[in-house]
Amino acid sequence: MWVAQGFVFAIEEINRDPHLLPNLTLGFSIRNSGDSVHGALHETMGFLTGCEEPIPNYTCGLSPPRAALVGDTRSVVSIPMARLLGLYKFPQVSYSSTLASLSDKTQFPSFLRTLASDLMSSHALAQLVLHFQWSWVGILAQDDDSGQQSSSLVTRELGKAGVCIEFHLHIPSLQSLEKINTIVHKMENCTATIILVFLSNSNFQLILQRLLGRGTMGQVWVSRETLHIAFALNTPGVSQVLQGSFSLLQHTSLAPGLPEFLSHLHPTRTPEDMFMKRFWEVTFRCTWPRGSQGSAGNSTMQGGVRFCSGNESLPVQEHPFQEVIKLDVAYSAVYSIAHALQDLVACESEDEVCADTRHFQPWQLLRSLRKVHFKTPDGTEIMFDANGDVITEFDILRGQKTVEGPFHFVHIGTVNPRSSLGDRMTIHLMKEELQVPSSVCSRSCALGFSQIPRQGFPHCCFECSRCLEGHFADQIDMKQCLLCPEEQYSSHTRDHCLPRTEIFLAFDEPLGLTLASAALMLAGLVLLVLGVFLKHRDTPVIRANNRALSYMLLTSLALCALSALLFLGRPTAATCLLRQTTFAIVFTVAVSSILAKTLTVVLAFRVTRPGDRVQVCLRPGASTLVVLVASLVQVVLCGVWLGTSPPFAERDTASEPSHIVIQCQEGSGVAFYCVLGYLGLLAGVTFSVAFLARGLPDAFNETKFLTFSMLLFCSVWTTFLPLYHSARGKSTVAVEIFSILASTAGLLGGIFIPKCYIILLKPEQNTPDWLSEELQSRRLPQGPSSRASPH
């Protein structure tokens, strides 16, 4: 009824306008479809043919011509009308049908509308959700075409943007208390704060009443018009549930002069208006007595029925919210037809089809109607897109209590599809610091953390896991941590990478300086011992222990101590080639010298008579041959190693996260362990022989010292292996240098320090007379002793 009055107002205003359709008067006829498909089709055919009983493809002398049809209200009724009118290319402009499928120009070529379609309003609603960064929402939808299509459109768009839907429930159009109670129970247990609503007014009102009855609060409702209507229905306590909720409304405003027009309406002024009495009854919720023509009288009550008196006042009557919206869009529909007629008559553009207002075809007006672009007297801009849908702004409103106390919806911003970027609509908020609730399944992962999906939940539900060493996350809510470049490492907070510094065991750092000093001091001590031996080379202590082997052993020990210096400083190709091979060869010479010493003592005591074949092994060159053969084998192994897969300098990025360790890579691991294995085998044989010979009589306890020194040597290198494999970075080099120096010191101290003690501090024991007395006291034959002391 309100819409009919809006039609009348718009047409009268157009007819009074001297600039719009001058010299032309618009007329109208209002038909009642009875809100049924059959009634709508019957009235549409009657309108097209001008016949009371319409006959297809037959007209009853139409004059004046029909321009367009405005209606109907519900989409289910508009669809068959649009199919029929599309066959004739007859323009149809709807002010209330929002079903998205009506935008299909293949099925409905002549359908246009001045109310936003479900597709556009759902898109705007989805944009609002994305703008406020809500990622965890619930959806309540009416189980009809409009509810299903709207909710499906929003679900699809939100899904593409990564928003998760906790639940998507459909409520039957026929009210079911059991289903409503199930929904309310679901609402009580849901974790989503934001609930999107695509419900009829009655179902939504039932849900609000149930939630109020159970004291369930905390949800923030987001919808198009439903929240306003629910509030307008004056449900007790509804403001408690709708507090903080959001609503999207197509931008509307009452046309200037419309309130005054409505206030002057009265049945007595237009008795010929068949809709006026019904409009009065709906507005004031009363019934005209039978036979009444709408004359003024007193309002009475009979049998619970309130009769209309005609004295009711429209100016003080509050306009129903839902009807006000329809008034505005219906007003726009009439104006769009008027401007299309104006463009058709004016024929200002070359590509426009000119026509006489008394003799034009429906398709001509339809073409102009699709291209109209104008502003209504109230300032509303009207234009249609390619699908015949009006391009309109949406007002964002939020329910809240004012300082004075009453609850109402406050305008906080707009959604503007005209200034959209791609698929994103532009949203303008009046207050940028607007406090909005959050709706997430899981709190955002901070910098330095990545998301770990929770099993059995949507991707919006996750746990936050700290990035591993060498990885970083410089944004919140990253799906996975990023790997730092090889030249960088992750910060302590794991939110950025820092440049790595190159490290190696340098001479100028405390540890390197200490080890270098120890190596030089140990080499100096060995050379000092060698000097003592050279100075006292003719004394019994020196002669009794094979001078040549002692000199060779001391020289190799000095080189062992100095070889540790090759492990210090920045590794180069040359030092990497020399490190392990030099260490292996000089230690092989040292160990083989000790083996030769031990064999000499053992074989000396096996000679029982002159001419024994064992005596051949006691010749001066035999012990040297043992050293040469043993060392030659090691040299061959090192040569094969260097020839096949030699060591090389590499940048180790795995040992220390914050540093790049410059180190030597052994190249062939097999060759490296063959070299070490051979040295270990030689040391094991030497220790075994020395251990077996430890009980042989000796004036200066040579075999016992050899056994003790080899025990130290084997202990050091047995301990070295696990430490070497567990150490990382430059600690590996430090462990090897320490083992080299410790084993060198052990051989030097175990074999030569006791002799130096006798030479320097007990010179009386380093004489032939004392040696003879010692031998006589042990009752040893002179022969073996002399044979055990080759020069």
Image (cartoon, grey):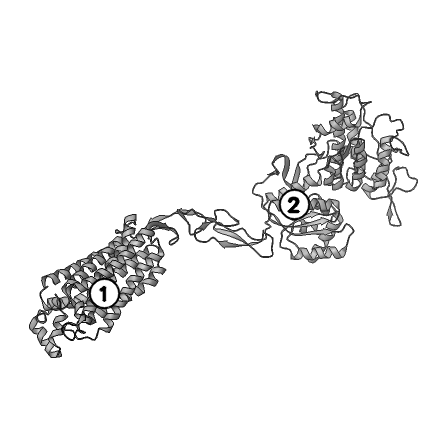
Residue shown at 72% from the left, 51% from the top: 170
Left or right, 609 with reference to 317: left
- Give how far across and how far down residue 737 sits, in percent: 27, 58
Q: In this view, does 123 lie above or below 557?
A: above
Q: Is residue 153 above or below residue 10?
A: below
- Is 653 on the left-hand or right-hand side of 174? left
Label 2 belongs to which residue? 156
Q: Residue furthest right?
A: 291
Residue drawn 83% across and 30% down? 28
User: Quadrant location of residue 178?
Assistant: bottom right
Give the x, y percent position of residue 414.
Answer: 63, 38
Query: Which is nearer the N-term, disc 2 or disc 1?
Result: 2
The N terminus - image quarter: top right
| Residue sitting at the far left | 769
Observer-nearest of 669 and 713: 669
Looking at the rendered structure, which numbered label has been put on residue 191? none
Front position in the image: 134 or 477: 477
Residue 469 shows in the view: yes
Which residue is tagged 1?
A: 746
Q: Is residue 264 at least partly visible in the picture?
A: no
Locate the C terminus by quadrant: bottom left
- Callout 1, which amino acid? Gly
Residue 786 on image: x %, y %:
12, 71
The percent coordinates of residue 246 (x first, y second) are 65, 45
Bin the neighbour count of mark 1 within 10 Å (Cα to Cα): few under 14, some 14-19, many 20 and up. some
Q: Which residue is drawn at 79% across and 25% down?
A: 15
Dot 1: what SS? helix
Q: Is residue 124 left or right of residue 90?
A: left
